[in-house]
Amino acid sequence: MGNTSCVLCGCVDQASVGVVEKWGRFQRLAEPGLHFFNPLAGECLAGILSTRINSLDVKIETKTKDNVFVQIHCSIQYRVIRENADDAFYELQNPKEQIQSYVFDVVRAHVPRMTLDELFEQKRDVAEAVLEELEKVMGAYGYNIEHILMVDIVPDPSVRIAMNEINAAQRMQLASVYKGEAEKIFLVKKAEADAEAKYLGGVGVARQRQAITDGLRENILNFSHKVEGTSAKEVMDLIMITQYFDTIKDLGNGSKNTTVFIPHGPGHVRDIGDQIRNGLMEAASAQVNVE
């Protein structure tokens, strides 16, 4: 892990720990600061280890349960345990390769038991399994595993394209359902509005006719009381003649150039009045017979 330095003194930096040997045998750990050694007694500074957190990025390619090849990017953060720095110095020649080998082993043991969707959902479980295994193994060599991050899961490009197409198709299907529901609600509301409009229109027409009837009755009664010797029939004929000429006037003043052919003459007003009167009498007679 480092070259032996047989000098009288040595300096160990902060966040580091030195390994001191005597005649080639481990003697003690040197804390940060200035240290003096006795070369005549065989003391020397064998090496210095950093206790800072190191990061190791690992890329693993494996296959899921549904036969999809994926590449998993892991980030392992580890550090040397200060109290066990001698184990880290003497036991492992290349700790990064050792950590990487265990990560490969654990990931390739867990991922093939999951589908691709389960892998995305349970990637934290895979990270915890790797952390548990590494802590158990690397702790004996003087290393502490701080964190393991599953940075990215990258499926095969063809699989990603297929997944995007499936997602797009599902969203289009859902959009069609919502569009159909919206059209259904629009048609129902339109039908309800038409029915309500027709109902209100009928109520308006009924009220209009009732108002016309009440007005005619009031006019007939007023005219009969103010002009002596007139009967209700004569007053009714006079009112109908007035309305008849008002109707013809409205037809002539219309904005559209429409030609209407109607029989016109002094006797036609009486004929119309007789027809209306006969209709009212027949309706009243039919109502009496029903009762």
Image (tube, helix red, strand yellow):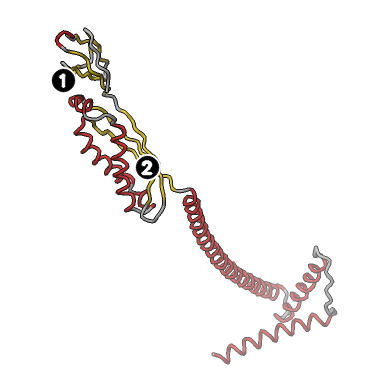
For the C terminus, the quadrant is bottom right
Which badge, 1 or 2, is on the more N-terminal residue?
Answer: 1
- Mark seen at residue 60: 2
Where does the image place residue 102, in percent across and percent down from the top left? 28, 40
Asked whether the beta carbons under mark 1 and mark 2 sit within 8 Å of each other, the answer is no
Q: Is residue 225 left or right of residue 47?
A: right
Q: CA distance from mark 1 to mark 2?
A: 39 Å
Quarter of the image where one finds residue 200: bottom right
| Residue in front for this viewpoint, 60 or 161 | 60
Q: Residue at x 68, y 72 (%)?
A: 219
Q: Amino acid at mark 2?
A: Ile
Q: Amino acid at mark 1?
A: Arg
Q: Is residue 217 left or right of residue 167?
A: right
When the figure is inspected, residue 100 is found, relative to residue 228, above or below; the finding is above
In this view, the mark in front (1 or 2):
1
When the figure is inspected, residue 43 is found, relative to residue 93, above or below; the finding is above
Taking the view exactly as shown, the residue that stands out farthest to the bottom is 289
Instruction: Tell me the SS state at disc 1.
Output: strand
| Residue in front for this viewpoint, 270 or 182 | 182
For the N terminus, the quadrant is top left
Quarter of the image where one finds residue 106: top left
Quarter of the image where one finds residue 255: bottom right
Q: Residue at x 43, y 45 (%)?
A: 154
Residue assigned mark 1: 25
Q: Residue at x 75, y 72 (%)?
A: 243
When the figure is inspected, residue 86 is found, relative to residue 146, above or below; the finding is above
Q: Is residue 161 left or right of residue 35?
A: right
Q: Is residue 155 left or right of residue 18?
A: right
Where does the image place residue 11, in percent across and percent down from the top left? 25, 11
